[in-house]
Amino acid sequence: MDTAQLTELELQVDFLLRTVEELKAENKSLRQRVASAVQDRSELQERHAQATGAIKTIIGQLKEELE
């Protein structure tokens, strides 16, 4: 290999190393976002279950009042 080829190879390796670091950072960020979304979903499911229970209770009370 001549100097030009080695220089080109070095540039390619540097580019690949930067790309790997960028992808690692992006992957970490995406994993954090997924974890946050999973937590949000869990909280929303709990709130939904509470609201469903409250609505069923209200419907039951209304039925009793109408009887």
Image: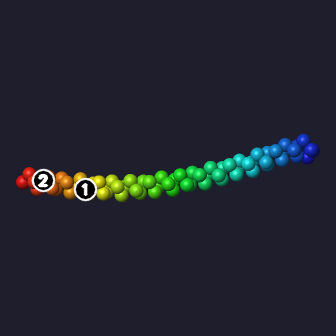
Tell me: 3 left or right of 41: right
Q: Are marks 1 and 2 in contact (CB under 8 Å)?
A: no
Q: Which mark is residue 10?
A: none
Q: Which amino acid does label 2 sit on?
A: Lys
Quarter the C terminus occupies: bottom left
Q: What residue type is labelled 1?
A: Ala
Q: Give residue 59's position: percent from left, percent from top.
A: 18, 53
Tell me: 44 left or right of 67: right
Q: From the viewer's side, name the closer residue of 16 and 47.
A: 47
Q: Is mark 2 on a helix, strand or loop?
A: helix
Residue at the (25%, 56%) spot, across then down: 54
For the view shown, which residue lies furthest in the left direction?
67
**Label 2 Cα crowd, 10 Å radius (few <14 / some 14-19 / many 20+):** few
Q: How is the image coloured?
A: rainbow
Residue at the (23%, 53%) spot, across then down: 55
Residue at the (84%, 47%) spot, across then down: 10
Q: What element carries label 1?
A: helix
Q: Which mark is residue 63?
A: 2
Q: Give residue 33's position: percent from left, percent from top.
A: 53, 52
Query: Compared to 30, does 4 lie above or below?
Result: above
From mark 1 to mark 2, how far is it between C-alphas?
14 Å
Query: Compared to 53, does 3 lie above or below?
Result: above
Q: Residue 54 carries which label?
A: 1
